[in-house]
């Protein structure tokens, strides 16, 4: 009789089992995926340096946060880090080459106008 009192069942009913304990929710891969997406967008839009450089910097910061805090999505974060760095380099190179071309064109125009002055 003492066994029945310790058991949380009524006669003829199956035993009551408590609901399974779920682990606390862990952070998702959102920051890591955002870092990769921003890096890809920055790389694709490198000729628009005024968009590419800020996007790549934000991607770089997000990737660094994920890697520093050991959050999930390490692969995405590494990809975002590498692509963001490459996008910054490409955008700066594009800007330097574009500035050199504009400077050469400006000098050529000055030379032409100098002939007629």
Image (cartoon, rainbow, N blue to C red):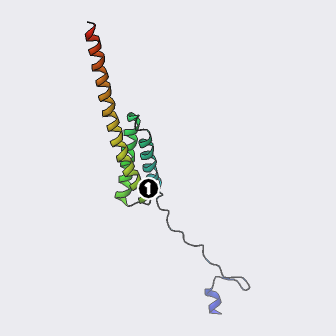
Q: How many marks?
A: 1
Give the image location of residue 35, x and y in percent: 42, 49
Residue extending farthest to the top is 117
Q: In this orientation, which residue lies closer to the viewer: 37 or 62?
A: 37
**Residue density around tag 1, few if under 14, some if 14–19, many if 20 or more, within 10 Å:** many
Give the image location of residue 96, x and y in percent: 30, 33
User: Which residue is rendered at x = 46% and y = 47% of the image?
Assistant: 37
In the rendered view of the protein, which quadrant contains the C terminus? top left
User: Which residue is rendered at x = 26% and y = 10% of the image?
Assistant: 115
Give residue 4's quadrant in the image.
bottom right
Q: In this orientation, which residue lies closer to the viewer: 83 or 25?
A: 83
Q: In this orientation, which residue lies closer to the viewer: 2 or 64?
A: 64
- Relative placement, left or right, of 62 versus 30 is left
The residue at which mark 1 appears reads as 76
- Relative placement, left or right, of 19 versus 34 is right
Task: Relative to 98, say whether 21 is above or below.
Answer: below
Residue extending farthest to the bottom is 1
Give the image location of residue 110, x and y in percent: 27, 15
């Amino acid at each position: 009789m003492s066994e029945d009192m310790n058991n949380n069942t009524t006669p003829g009913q199956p035993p009551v089992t408590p609901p399974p304990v779920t682990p606390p929710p862990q952070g998702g891969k959102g920051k890591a995926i955002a870092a990769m997406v921003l890096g890809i967008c920055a790389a694709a839009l490198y000729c628009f340096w005024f968009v590419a450089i800020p996007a790549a910097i934000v991607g770089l910061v997000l990737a660094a946060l994920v890697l520093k805090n050991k959050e999930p999505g390490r692969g995405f974060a590494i990809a975002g880090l590498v692509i963001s760095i490459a996008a910054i380099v490409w955008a700066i190179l594009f800007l330097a080459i574009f500035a050199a071309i504009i400077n050469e064109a400006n000098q050529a125009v000055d030379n032409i106008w100098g002939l007629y002055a």
